[in-house]
Image: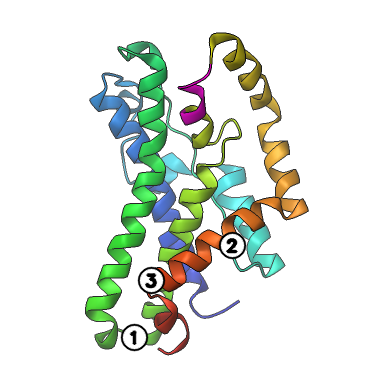
Amino acid sequence: MSIETPFVIFLVFFSVVCHEIAHGYVALRLGDPTAYKMGRLTFNPISHVDPIGTVMLPALFLLSGSRIMLAWAKPVPVNPMYFRNPRKGMMWVALAGPAANLAIALVLTGLLHLTAEFLPRVLVRSLAMTALMNVVLMVFNLIPIPPLDGSRVVARFLSREALISYYRMERYGLIIVFGLLWLGVIGNILAPALNFAVYHLNLLPYLYKF
């Protein structure tokens, strides 16, 4: 475990909280007050802890020495019946989470480019690693396996019959995700995104030279 690990864990958890708040905020703007009324549009970490996604899965990645870390917070409740167009509304709600991760990655990258030379090395590396983890979180959540966010985007364009069959997968979704992780399929999806971010956001100097 490196000296940056505690900082990265904290920042990644903050990122997944932002991801869920983004879902709830867009749902609220589209007319669904469910998450707001349940007190889920808050940065209070206790409201967002999911035993598997927030605790067990990140711990597994840390113990295995993985180059990547996946995590999620407790999903915010969304009631699509409040939306004028439920499937279209759910698509925008779903996209809000990955968009939040992309925004965090870009903000952290911009902050590094402007201030890295004035910051301690441990903080520079932590911010760079967190930016990369947000790219990973964005891409991972856009994989079209129910209940990941990408499935809500795909659902927007399916026929009613196809949608019913598609959502039958949801009960097995986590099993499928863990199976694909174990087989390395998801790693093969995430690796190009990670490499793209490292080079095109120019994060390499902050990971190795500082």
Magenta-colored span: 153-158
Residue under the image location 38 percent in, 71 percent down: 127
Q: Which mark is residue 191?
A: 2
Say whether marks 1 and 3 touch (CB < 8 Å): no
Quadrant for the C terminus in the image: bottom left
Pointer 1 residue: 120
Q: Is residue 114 left or right of residue 106?
A: left
Residue under the image location 49 percent in, 43 percent down: 73
Distance from Cα at disc 2 to Cα at disc 3: 19 Å
Residue under the image location 35 percent in, 38 percent down: 96
Badge 3: residue crowd in 10 Å (few <14, some 14–19, many ≥20): many
Compared with 38, 68 (above or below) is below
Q: Which mark is residue 127?
A: 3
Could you say which is closer to the camera, residue 107 or residue 58?
Answer: 107
Compared with 17, 171 (above or below) is above
State which mark lies toward you, 1 or 3. 3
Residue under the image location 59 percent in, 30 percent down: 146
